[in-house]
């Protein structure tokens, strides 16, 4: 657990204005599609912060921040990987490449993206929709 939640100024200083806008847009998009609890944490060795979306003990995804970089991670278990792979050609080449280059562990594929703009956001929502049904509109 973090001692203090980073402010907008903290985040902007860490990742830069344009990436902070990407971060905020991604958070807003996830919030729009999924009703989840959110929690801040330490980002481990590689990241300064972790911002996790979860409900009922299950993690939907996590956002990460470090100097001049934001990360978006989704862990796909075996059944979820099968669903993705069945629909893979309908995702962007960038998403397919990142997925293909991600190591598969015993508990799933920990797929990490480092978005610099909003171009993969549709793919992100589709990936998350494999894990959990989006909110009804």
Image (tube, rainbow, N blue to C red):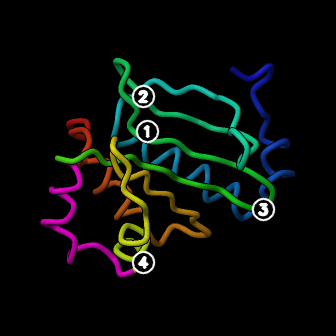
Tag 2 residue: 54
Q: Which of marks 4 and 1 is nearer the N terminus?
A: 1
Image quarter where the N terminus lies is: top right
User: Is residue 91 found inside the magenta-colored segment of the image?
Assistant: yes
Q: How far apart are marks 1 and 2 (CA)?
A: 12 Å
Q: Which residue is drawn at 15% across and 56% down?
A: 83
Q: How crowded is mark 2: few (under 14 residues within 10 Å), some or many (20 or more)?
A: some
Tag 3 residue: 68
- SS label for mark 4: helix
Q: Distance between the residues labelled 3 and 2?
A: 25 Å
- Type of secondary structure dominating the magenta stretch: helix
Tag 1 residue: 31
Q: Residue 80 in the image: state x and y as whole percent.
A: 21, 49
Query: Is 56 rendered above or below residue 115?
Result: above
- SS label for mark 3: loop
Which residue occupies the foreground of this view, 65 or 80?
A: 80
Q: Residue 73 in the image: state x and y as whole percent.
A: 48, 50
Q: Distance between the residues labelled 3 and 1?
A: 24 Å
Q: Residues within 10 Å of mark 3 (few under 14, many from 20)?
A: some
- The boundaries of the magenta stretch are 80-93
Relative to 56, 88 lies left or right: left
Residue 4, picture quadrant: top right
Relative to 134, 48 lies left or right: right
């Amino acid at each position: 657990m973090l001692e203090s939640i980073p402010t907008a100024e903290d985040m902007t200083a860490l990742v830069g204005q344009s990436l902070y806008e990407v971060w905020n847009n991604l958070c807003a998009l996830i919030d729009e599609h999924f009703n989840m609890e959110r929690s801040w944490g330490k980002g481990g060795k590689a990241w300064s912060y972790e911002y996790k979306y979860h409900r009922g003990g299950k993690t939907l995804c996590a956002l990460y921040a470090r100097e001049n970089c934001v990360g978006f991670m989704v862990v796909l278990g075996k059944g979820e990987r099968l669903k993705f792979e069945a629909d893979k050609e309908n995702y962007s080449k960038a998403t397919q490449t990142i997925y293909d280059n991600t190591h598969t562990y015993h508990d799933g594929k920990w797929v990490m993206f480092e978005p610099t703009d909003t171009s993969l956001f549709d793919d992100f929502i589709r990936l998350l929709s494999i894990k959990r049904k989006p909110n009804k509109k």
